[in-house]
Amino acid sequence: MLIVTEWKEFRTPDFDGIAASLRDRIVFDGRNLYEPELIRSFGLEYLSIGRR
């Protein structure tokens, strides 16, 4: 999944549903919208721009 917007409706998605629907469980966050620990708690790999 690729995040390229900061729109309000994308700030609180259903991460359980997202994790279940992704074949490759990777989130690329180009806007640093989410905290890495939160995303990883759903079993997703999290890569963001400008963060370690």
Image (cartoon, rainbow, N blue to C red):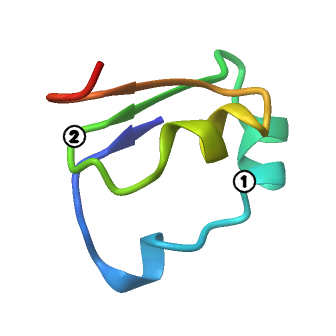
**CA separation in Å, label 1 and label 2:** 17 Å
In the rendered structure, find residue 15 and report the number of the disc placed on it.
1
In the rendered structure, find residue 33 and report the number of the disc placed on it.
none
Q: Which residue is mark 2?
A: 30
Tally the marks.
2
Foreground pick, 51 / 21: 51
Q: Is residue 46 above or below residue 24?
A: below
Q: Residues within 10 Å of mark 1 (few under 14, many from 20)?
A: some
Q: Is residue 44 left or right of residue 9?
A: right
Look at the numbered disc 1 and give the secondary structure of its residue.
helix
Q: Is residue 25 left or right of residue 3?
A: right
Q: Is residue 30 above or below residue 4?
A: above
Q: Position of residue 4 (x, y in %)?
A: 23, 50
Look at the numbered disc 2 and give the secondary structure of its residue.
loop
Residue furthest to the left: 50
Residue drawn at (36%, 84%) of the image: 8
Residue drawn at (83%, 51%) of the image: 16
Foreground pick, 52 / 28: 52
Residue drawn at (64%, 15%) of the image: 24
Q: Residue 25's quadrant in the figure?
A: top right
Which amino acid, by three-letter code, is at mark 1?
Phe
Q: Does label 1 or label 2 sit earlier along the sequence?
A: 1
Residue drawn at (64%, 47%) of the image: 38
Q: Is residue 1 left or right of residue 20?
A: left
Which amino acid, by three-letter code, is at mark 2?
Gly
Q: Is residue 17 above or below residue 2?
A: below
Quarter the C terminus occupies: top left
Q: Position of residue 18 (x, y in %)?
A: 71, 47
